[in-house]
Amino acid sequence: MKNILITGGAGFIGSHVVRLFVNKYPDYTIVNLDKLTYAGNLANLKDIEDKSNYYFEKCDICDFGSVSNIFRKYDIDGVIHLAAESHVDRSIKDPFTFAETNVLGTLSLLQAAKSHWNGNWENKLFYHISTDEVYGALEMNGGFFVETTKYQPHSPYSASKASSDHFVCAFHDTYGIPTIITNCSNNYGPYQFPEKLIPLFINNIRNRKPLPVYGKGENIRDWLYVEDHARAIDLIFHEGRIAETYNIGGFNEWKNIDLINILIKTVDNLLGNPEGTSTHLITYVADRAGHDLRYAIDSTKLHKELGWSPSLQFEEGIERTVKWYLNNQEWLDNITSGDYKRYYEEMYKTR
Ligand code: NAD
Ligand code: TYD
């Protein structure tokens, strides 16, 4: 596979995957297909946007005609599908957009790949990026999610991702299209939209704003540094077995309130504030509806089959992440003001 379509490449994880592939594989054609929703930001890819193997297509995955044209234009033979609506709180307010993008958008891409490849499946791959949230929630001491754990999504977000996973499997089982699915735990790192816990809280600590902790802050998430996820995607794209599912996670569980205290300590320390300066910003607020108690991934299969394991210790990853957000205040300020959208909209009008 040499002509690779990466959807959602202007988002958080997608931008790390695009960067890795563009830099590592100069002989591949990397096409970034993105609608540039509120979460898509081409400033995430400034360092590689002029590379000769990189192409950007502003497109909605739900627009079957335009997606099909892009398959033909670049003769796409590999797809890494990340484009999605990704924030649970937004899905609670507006479930329709999640069904549209995550379910119908994935179906549109699958159908376009199937038509373009037309039964010639050799050296073709549709790789779908999914989440551990499709498995539902674990009890405090309730083991781990493995690849065979029953799907039991609770939020409109996870229900839409579960549905898209089922469509991917159905396209393999019904038509024979080569597919792989991976289900990853919570990612953190540079370029994450500041509505998610870690960048939101770093930004709020910097701006001395309240830190809204849902419920008692006792929910547990399993955190993975985003570049480790991108490395896993690269490995699985090239060496994963067709029709398989792989779980990706770092065996790195944190109770929200403990993680928040680490963030406070790290930000205060890097800003030169005495320890405990920002603790008073913690504000307990009403819990998220249907808030999943605990996620925890068992990634033994990926480790045993392909030799992947995370490269970073959490403390190092958090320090790196906090430093990145503090050193990239312009990126954060542009996002929170919406300026990045206006800048790139103008740029694409004049190109
Ligand atoms: P993100 O919200 O940061 O980025 C999503 C990208 O998709 C944006 O660039 C957006 O413009 C684009 N997009 C949205 N709707 C589109 C449409 N209709 N057509 C074309 N492009 C569209 O998301 P993320 O956190 O980078 O997540 C990427 C993928 O990884 C998602 O599929 C998500 O479910 C999955 N995932 C995320 C996490 C996580 O912790 N963030 C963990 C596991 C899996
Ligand atoms: P989030 O980053 O939205 O990821 P997800 O819901 O996909 O796990 O939230 C991570 C955890 O932090 C989750 O348990 C909800 C909690 N949370 C808060 O307590 N306050 C917040 O403002 C946000 C955004 C999340």
Image (spheres, grey):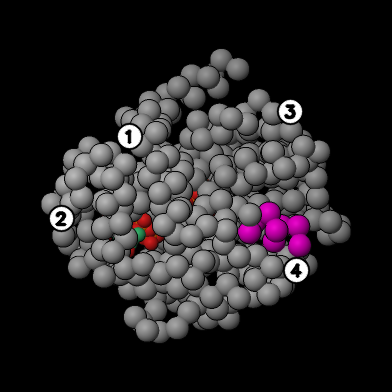
Instruction: Name the residue rendered at 69%, 28% in the picture.
Output: 51
x then y, percent, for residue 209:
18, 42
**Which residue is tagged 2?**
283
Q: Is residue 280 visible?
A: yes
2 or 4: mark nearer the eye: 2
Q: Amino acid at mark 2?
A: Thr
**Which residue is tagged 1?**
336
Q: Is residue 137 left or right of residue 176?
A: left
- Is residue 233 magenta-colored? yes
Gap between marks 4 and 1 measured at Cα: 41 Å
- Is residue 310 magenta-colored? no
Q: Amino acid at mark 1?
A: Thr
Tell me which label, 3 or 2, sits earlier in the chain.
3
Q: Secondary structure at mark 1?
A: helix
Q: Is residue 57 left or right of residue 313?
A: right
Does mark 1 have its CB less than 8 Å from ligand 2?
no
Residue 52 versus residue 94 in the image, above or below: above
- Viewer-closest of 222 and 57: 222
**Which residue is tagged 4?**
241
Instruction: Name the residue rendered at 58%, 81% in the picture.
Output: 148
Does mark 2 have its CB less than 8 Å from ligand 2?
no
Give residue 31's quadrant in the image: top right
Residue 255 versus residue 59 in the image, above or below: below
**Which residue is tagged 3?**
52
> Where's the C terminus, which quadrant?
top right
x then y, percent, for residue 273:
21, 41
Q: Amino acid at mark 3?
A: Ser
